[in-house]
Image: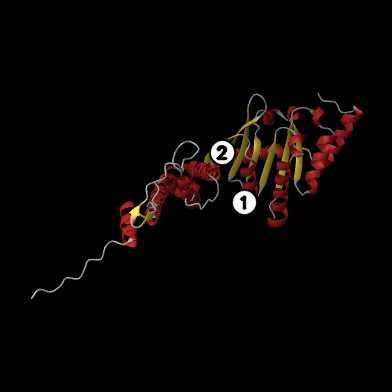
Amino acid sequence: MSTAQPPVAPDTPDRARGAAGHRRGTPASGRRRALVVGVVAGLVVWGVAALLSPEDGAGRHLAAAALCALGAVAVAHLWAPPEHPAPEEGGQAVPPDPGRRGRTGGQTAGAEAAEGTGAPVEGPPLLREFARLETERVARQMAELASLAVECPGENHDWLLSLTRAAEQSVRATSTSVDLGFWNSEPAGRYLDAQHEAITDRGVPVRRLFLVERAAQLDDALLRLCEEQELLRIDVRVVVLPELPPHLARGTTFDGVVFDEEVSYETVRDLREVNARTRIDARPDHVRSRTRRFEELWEAGMGLRELEGRVDDEEDGTWMTG
């Protein structure tokens, strides 16, 4: 006598989705791959840094490795293929809708790219594409920071504000031109507010050195600018470059800020005196050179009281230069 075999249950939508997800991979597996890539990249950078510059110490090696690992993880997320299974209806996969096109003709390219970064961006396709491009830009910069230097076009006020808010020991700022238009602008207001907060909230000393190209620039406008910054508890000095002694005049000047004697923020101007590039440089030799040059010029500079006397003399015509 034969026994009846139990009926085989047909594939249900849940089982079909499970099989499809297994075949195509899961988001968890993608995250594991990105994590492995980041760990490997971090270990490689740590090893190379330890071999090439052991004098920098374990702290700097670890920081470089961590930045590189973060950049590698972000890039891995960006370039990973979408891992979401296609939606199904009644156990059957639904083909993509050919009518859903992005601005460049790709099928919801912006949405898929934004989802690949792990950022839950909602909104129109343009917003999702913007989120993807911004994430990709930051990931590239984080990867470049593994070499302790990164550049971007134009003047980057966001970098300046973030470094000011992160400073814990000192801020040494050098301005090679007295740009009154900038100091009256909205970005300058946010910058000065961030410096004042660093002084009052964290006890970070902030010094600003104005470098002027001729004595005629010692006027009331410059004096008022220095007095305003002194009221914010920023220590200000002024240097007239042609009046420097020869051993200081031969040195280089730069427009930028040294934070905590660890990171140098610099703007590079073109022939039209426009800030063409911004650079962050944390190479120890470079930062030491910038710090030493600032201190030399600072010692040669005039304080607010001396500046007041010079301005009065310039207005009276009693100050003579040799």
State the SS at label 2.
helix
Q: Measuring 87% from the left and 28% from the top, which residue is drawn there?
A: 319
Where is residue 140 shown, x and y percent of the image? 49, 41
Residue at the spot of label 2? 286
What kind of residue is marked 1?
A: Ala
Residue 177 visible to the viewer: yes
Distance, label 2 to label 1, CA atoms, is 20 Å
Residue 61 visible to the viewer: no
Q: How is the image coloured?
A: secondary structure
State the SS at label 1.
helix
Where is residue 15 shown, x and y percent of the image? 31, 61
Left or right side of 152 for 29: left
Give the number of the disc on residue 166: 1
Q: Looking at the image, is mark 2 or mark 1 earlier in the sequence? A: 1
* Residue sitting farthest toward the bottom: 1
Is residue 237 or residue 321 the one in the foreground? 237
* Residue sitting farthest toward the right: 316
Pointer 2: residues within 10 angstroms few (<14), some, or many (20+)? Answer: few
On screen, residue 233 above or below 140: below
Left or right side of 114 for 313: right
Residue 26 falls in which quadrant of the image? bottom left
The mark total stands at 2
Where is residue 222 shown, x and y percent of the image? 81, 36
Where is residue 112 shown, x and y percent of the image? 45, 46
On screen, residue 8 above or below 171: below
What kind of residue is marked 2?
A: His
Q: Do residues under tags 2 and 1 come within 8 Å of each other at their CB atoms?
A: no
